[in-house]
């Protein structure tokens, strides 16, 4: 068993593409080897600014012999079809077998190929895989011909068992040579034999090959240098990943931020440093206040301990922050409330009007939601009126990711209520799965109004998510609605609110259209809830079982019902009750089909002939009243406990009573009793939707 080492060496690969490219390279190589019947023990891919690396261990020196059965045309097919099949398979008709299946007799060619040496196989695979690598953007250069790569390709290091795999791609021939750091290694060629000496030689040439190791170096140096000043770095995993893709030999330096810029909100400073310069921000551990320091990760060892690097970056940062401070100062000259009119000039969507029209809808929805959850209606309307106004500011124009955040700063500067300002900031949240959902009533009202308007508006105009795309992030909006409602325990009649949202968007639509659209959005929300629960390992079929009753659009109540149902079914009584339900449902289904009628109604208690019939009837009547009462009081655990007590009489009924009695009247009465059992259990959920 031998090792295969592949390095694709090029000009700088964009940091955002590196990790995925390494994964794609590994995926394509695994597929190509599998197609050729070749197995291996382990595979590993690495990425960096100038190279993609793949290491495969445990490859055999010889490809196994291949035997393939190729199905051809039907016996008696036209001669041209048979001849074409024989040519493609490379066999004669005498070498074919005849096999029979349900459709008739067919020719089958048995193709046997002697396995080639692994070196030959890899020589075919490497250019094939390189040509299939799905770069988001690629280019042609020089004499590369039609071949494309993300950046000009300089080298292909391809070794199998220390021997060069002969191949060519984009005019570049494979070899056993690579190069170290662009500047620190003096660009001397490094001859490679195996991965072990390859990794060590690169490190000696100032290249840290493993991106995780580069991240660890950056993180460690950041903490150490910050700690020496009594500070700590502000966590930024995304920036750490990006910077690790920009450097081969990371060296951290700390620079100063001039005091004049520290009056600017820290979010502006951090965003400007992160977006434009890839700098890390630092803070004081005790207060959490941003410190007048920044960290830059260089790709160089400097003889002056980085003094020139630091001075140059401080000079660049000064210019960047001067622009940011200018926007901040200019924006505050116009009150946020006076900016609302300018939203008429910002189109939200061609079919859905301007941001101003949207603000008016959000304002109306926020008022309705506030009434439902007990928030201050006037404050909710004020926050909704101002929530998009910061889109007209210079800071948000430069840094769109600060929308909402800057609205809060401008609102506080204008003397707006703190709760109103917080709601302006929070109405975009949660932005992603790691973000915190708002729980303050005012913030909940405006955030829900914003997301519900977006969701209903796009559904109304046929812009629903598909399996291949969700350009308007409607799935994220739905998950945001779910998280906000569940985290804040907001009790809302969603169908009513969705219907009102559509009325605001399209007043000309009739009531039937409103109802259908609202129902579609509610169903979409339910699907998102099921997906979310499935990812957490929770039984999503129980959501279907509760929703199918058609009377539940309060997510807090829905989740409580589902939790209680899940607890019931995880108990012995609940599991046995489900089995009994299925037995009853199967009997009813079979008999209703046979008799051509539906058994629904109340059985005649005078017609019972066995005590188990009467006992089940009485217990069902009592349980039905108790379950309905407990559900009405939202005491779902208690309702499930009542259901669990039905196990005994149900088991006794099936043990002692023959449903399909010879007497037609007795049989009908017993089927009605089973129907009563079914309807009683359906007070809680549609048990036919429960899996397992």
Image (cartoon, rainbow, N blue to C red):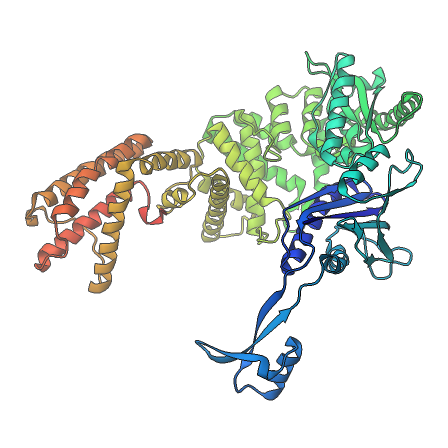
Q: Point out residue 35 in the picture as x, y percentages from the top left corner.
A: 64, 60
658 up-or-down from 473: above or below: below
Name the one closer to the observer, 432 or 454.
432
Left/right of residue 125 with respect to residue 521 in the rendered view: right
What residue is drawn where x is 39% and y is 33%? 560
Q: Point out residue 451 in the picture as x, y percentages from the top left corner.
A: 57, 39
Q: Point out residue 219 in the picture as x, y percentages from the top left corner.
A: 73, 25
284 up-or-down from 106: above or below: above
Which quadrant holds residue 43?
A: top right
Name the one closer to the observer, 301 or 349.
301
Left/right of residue 451 with respect to residue 229 in the rendered view: left
What residue is drawn where x is 83% and y is 58%? 168
Left/right of residue 406 with respect to residue 369 in the rendered view: right
Residue 43 seen from this side: yes
Which quadrant holds residue 284?
A: top right
Number of numbered discs on residues: 0
What residue is drawn where x is 80% and y is 27%? 279
Residue 332 seen from this side: no
Q: Point out residue 523 in the picture as x, y percentages from the top left corner.
A: 46, 47
Name the one closer to the observer, 358 or 192.
192
């Amino acid at each position: 068993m031998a090792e295969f080492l592949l390095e694709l060496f090029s000009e700088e690969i964009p940091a955002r593409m590196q990790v995925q490219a390494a994964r794609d390279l590994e995926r394509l190589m695994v597929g190509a080897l599998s197609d050729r019947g070749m197995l291996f023990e382990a595979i590993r891919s690495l990425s960096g600014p100038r190279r993609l690396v793949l290491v495969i261990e445990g490859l055999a020196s010889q490809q196994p012999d291949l035997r393939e059965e190729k199905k051809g045309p039907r016996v008696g097919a036209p001669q041209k079809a048979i001849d074409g099949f024989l040519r493609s398979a490379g066999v004669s008709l005498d070498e074919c077998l005849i096999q029979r299946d349900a459709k008739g007799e067919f020719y089958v060619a048995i193709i046997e190929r002697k396995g080639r040496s692994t070196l030959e196989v890899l020589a075919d695979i490497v250019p094939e895989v390189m040509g299939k690598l799905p770069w988001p953007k690629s280019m042609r250069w020089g004499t590369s011909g039609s071949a494309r790569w993300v950046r000009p390709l300089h080298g292909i290091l391809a070794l199998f068992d220390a021997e060069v795999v002969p191949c060519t791609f984009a005019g570049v021939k494979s070899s056993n040579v690579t190069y170290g750091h662009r500047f620190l290694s003096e660009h001397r060629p490094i001859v490679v034999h195996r991965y072990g000496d390859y990794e060590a030689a690169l490190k000696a040439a100032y290249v840290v090959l493993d991106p995780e190791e580069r991240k660890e170096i950056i993180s460690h140096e950041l903490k150490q240098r910050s700690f020496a000043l009594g500070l700590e770095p502000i966590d930024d995993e995304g920036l750490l990943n990006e910077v690790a893709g920009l450097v081969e030999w990371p060296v951290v330096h700390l620079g100063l931020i001039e005091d004049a810029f520290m009056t600017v909100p820290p979010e502006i400073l951090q965003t400007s440093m992160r977006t434009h310069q890839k700098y890390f921000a630092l803070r004081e551990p005790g207060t959490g206040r941003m410190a007048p320091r920044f960290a830059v990760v260089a790709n160089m060892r400097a003889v002056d301990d980085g003094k020139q690097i630091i001075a140059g970056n401080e000079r660049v940062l000064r210019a960047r922050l001067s622009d940011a401070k200018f926007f901040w100062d200019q924006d505050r000259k116009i009150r946020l409330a006076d900016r609302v009119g300018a939203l008429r000039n910002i189109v939200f969507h061609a079919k859905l009007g301007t941001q101003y029209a949207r603000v008016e809808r959000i304002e109306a929805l926020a008022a309705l939601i506030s009434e439902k959850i007990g928030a201050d209606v006037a404050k909710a309307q004020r926050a909704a009126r101002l929530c998009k106004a910061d889109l007209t500011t210079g800071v948000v124009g430069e840094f769109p990711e600060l929308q909402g955040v800057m609205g809060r700063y401008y609102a506080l500067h204008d003397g707006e209520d703190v709760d109103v300002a917080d709601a302006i900031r929070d109405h975009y949240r949660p932005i992603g799965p790691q973000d915190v959902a708002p729980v303050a009533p005012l913030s909940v009202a405006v955030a829900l109004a914003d997301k519900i308007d977006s969701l209903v508006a796009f559904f109304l105009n046929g812009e629903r998510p598909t399996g291949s795309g969700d350009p308007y992030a409607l799935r994220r909006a739905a998950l945001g609605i779910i998280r906000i409602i569940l985290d804040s325990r907001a009790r809302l009649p969603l169908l009513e609110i969705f219907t009102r949202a559509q009325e605001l968007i399209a007043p000309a639509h009739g009531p039937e259209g409103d109802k259908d659209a609202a129902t579609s959005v509610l169903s979409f929300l339910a699907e998102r809830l099921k997906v979310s629960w499935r990812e957490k390992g929770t039984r999503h079929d129980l959501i279907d079982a509760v929703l199918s009753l058609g009377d539940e659009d309060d997510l807090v109540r829905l989740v409580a019902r589902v939790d209680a149902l899940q607890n019931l079914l995880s108990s012995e009584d609940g599991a046995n009750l489900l089995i009994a339900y299925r037995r009853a449902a199967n009997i009813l289904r079979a008999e209703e089909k046979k008799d051509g009628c539906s058994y629904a109604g109340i059985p005649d208690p005078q017609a019972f002939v066995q005590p188990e019939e009467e006992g089940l009837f009485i217990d069902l009547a009592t349980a039905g009243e108790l379950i309905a009462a407990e559900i009405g009081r939202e005491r779902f655990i208690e309702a499930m406990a009542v259901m669990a007590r039905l196990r005994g009489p149900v088991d006794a009924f099936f043990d002692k009573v023959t449903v399909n009695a010879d007497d037609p009247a007795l049989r009908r009465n017993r089927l009605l009793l089973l129907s009563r059992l079914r309807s009683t259990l359906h007070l809680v959920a549609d048990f036919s939707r429960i899996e397992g």
